[in-house]
Image (cartoon, rainbow, N blue to C red):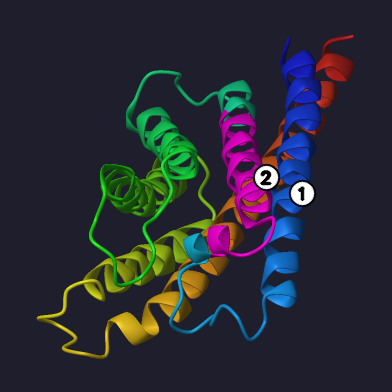
Amino acid sequence: MEVIRGKRRAVLAPLAVASLVLSLFPIVYLHVASAGQISPISHTISDYIFVANGTGLLAVTALSLAAGSVVLLMALFGAGLPRRGPITVLVGLWSAGLTAATVFPTDPTGTPTTFPGAVHRYAGAIMFVSLPLAGLLISRRFIPSTTVRNLAFASGITSFLFLLSHVPVVFPGNGALLLGLAERILFAVLYGLLFALAAALRRDNTRTTDNARTTVEVTA
């Protein structure tokens, strides 16, 4: 049974990585294609919907990232993670936040906040808090990986600073200028966290499968 579970995890983990890698291509293209039009320092990633083909490409990135996260969660289930618990809820909120932020677009900079824009903003706040917390819980309770723990901690700090940069009282006049840079750093760390989780899961799967085979051989 353990060998069967190991094979299932061996399929799901690479599938999750493939989905994560796929999500990178559209956003990298948008950065290159809109250079000079969208500032990576002051404009958020959501602002790419205002460039040619930006809405569709950004949707591919967000939905592929959400799908890859869900598949990674399924791989964690196969490794023994309880299906009910805070980790499942947090990863679900992260994926749901990505989806909601795709369905409800942001508002143009300097315009009044609309209902879709407000939903987009709160969805972003929820997802940026959820994944770092999930990573910390996984590293403490399930996969004792120093890399996962460090990246989860780093993403938590970066997420806090990014969300804090929205408050003009804290950064009078300067916070908004750095929103784009802060968000890109945050996403880079979050991607690192997801890839580190997949790598840790693969190592754990290899070790578990080898132990199961050894047990079967000894029993035989």
Asked if marks 2 and 1 touch (Cβ < 8 Å), the reply is yes
Alpha carbons under labels 2 and 1: distance apart: 8 Å
Q: Quarter of the image containing the N terminus?
A: top right
Q: Is residue 62 on the magenta stretch?
A: yes
Please rate how many residues cluster around mark 2, counting C-alpha atoms within 10 Å: few if below 14, some from 14 to 19, many from 20. some
Between 150 and 36, which is closer to the camera in this rendering? 36
Amino acid type of the residue tagged 2 in the rendering: Val
Q: Which residue is painted at 44% across and 49% down in the image?
A: 135
The quarter holding residue 152 reads bottom left
The disc labelled 1 sits on which kind of residue? Leu
Q: Is residue 126 magenta?
A: no
Classify mark 2: helix, strand or loop: helix
Residue 37 drawn above or below residue 48: below
User: Which numbered circle lies on residue 157?
Assistant: none
Rendering coords of residue 50 (x, y %): 54, 62
Residue visible at 78% across and 14% down in the picture: 4
The residue indicated by pointer 2 is 60
Q: Which residue carries the number 1 mark?
A: 22
Quarter residue 80 falls in? top right
Is 86 left, or right, of 13 in this rendering? Answer: left
- Which of pointers 2 and 1 indicates the residue nearer the eye? 2
